[in-house]
Every structure is written in structure tokens, then in C-alpha cells.
Amino acid sequence: QLPGVGNPPAMIIASVGGGGLICGLFEGLERHGISSTVVAAETEGAASFGKSFVSGKKIRLESIDSIATSLGALEVTDVALDRARAHQEKGGVVKAAMCTDAEAVEACVRFAEDCRILVEPACGAALAPLYSDRLRKDALDGLGEGPIVVEVCGGSGVNTDLLSLWKKEYLEKE
């Protein structure tokens, strides 16, 4: 959906679970000859893509230890790792952004305040590189010109009561 909107995106950020969404992103970028930076975002306790990508070999998690249960794939598909490598070989950049559960929740809260849209922590993982000082520096390092696109999805498992509960549990610890 991005071709024809002007400059190609400098960066696309998306949450990764089993790898289906990011495979689609890589396929679309390849189809249109776009070599943007792709940031694959996960929480640390569900980082099957990130841990596999960083280590250079597929890693199967023993368990999902995260509030972002909809990211809960014990292992990412081989195709996602292959497409990430192919994207890099064609001049693109791929980064793994692994946030804490607290950073994911903080991103959900801040996005709700900024945009009046509720999202669950799996989506908060994709928003965390924008809201977290720790993650933002690495995500933006070496970024070229163009818009930043964030795939914002995952709102069916959240309501104001849950967001308030997560905020108390993860952000208001003493």
C-alpha cells in the first residue's frame, strides 16, 4: 500500500510473532524494490525472531515469558529469517528491537494518550522503539531520509480496565 505515496519509507517497524506479518512486509518491499530499514519488534520474553536473528541461527524459546502473549511463538518461521537475510543482501537494513514488558506497556499508555487508540502490548512492542529512549537511539541510528511507518495492530485484547491494570502492574512499581 506504500508505493505511490511519495518517498519510500526510511523505516518500517512491526511486531513479530511467528513471522507471517514480517514476511509479508519483506515480500512487499522486495516486489517494489524498496530497501528500507525494517525493525522487528518483540518483547524480551517472546523474542524468537530477535534472538534467532542476532545469533544467526534459529532458536526455539523454552516458554513465552511476556505480557505480549499474542506474540507468543516459541520459534519464528525459517522463511522470516531467510527473508530478513535476503533484504540485507539487497541493501536493506534489519534490526531486532527487544523491549521489556514495561516498555511495551508504557508505549501502549503513551499511544493511548497521544492518539486516543487502545492497543495491546504486542503492538506496544512495535511502538516501544519510538517511545523508549533506550530503544530509539538504536532504531534511528543511521536512518536515511523518508517517513517512518509503524504497523499498528492488535487492539482486540485490550480495554481501558486492562490498560489501567497493566499500567499499575508494570509502571507504578515501588
Image (cartoon, grey):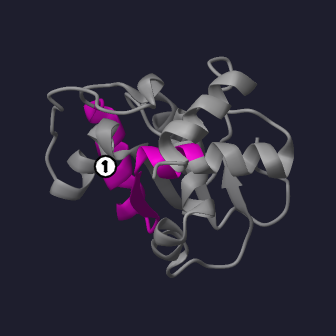
- Vertical comparison of 71 with 93: above or below: above
Query: Would you say residue 83 sits in the magenta stretch?
Result: yes
Q: Let me know if residue 68 is in the magenta part.
A: no
Extreme residue in the front direction: 174
Q: Amino acid at mark 1?
A: Gly
Quadrant assignment for the N terminus = top right
Please identify the residue farthest to the top as the structure is shown: 156
* Residue at the spot 43% in from the left edge and 29% down from the top edge: 71
Q: Looking at the image, which residue is at 16% across and 40% down?
A: 58
Residue 11 falls in image quadrant:
bottom right
Identify whether 61 is placed above or below 31: above
Tell me residue 166's x, y (percent). Answer: 56, 34
Question: Which is nearer the eye, 4 or 66?
Answer: 66
Magenta highlight range: 76-105
* Label 1 sits on residue: 50
- Whether 73 is drawn above or below 24: the answer is above
The x and y percentages for residue 88 are 38, 62
User: Dot 1: what SS?
Assistant: helix
Q: Is residue 34 visible?
A: no
Residue displayed at 36% across by 25% down:
72
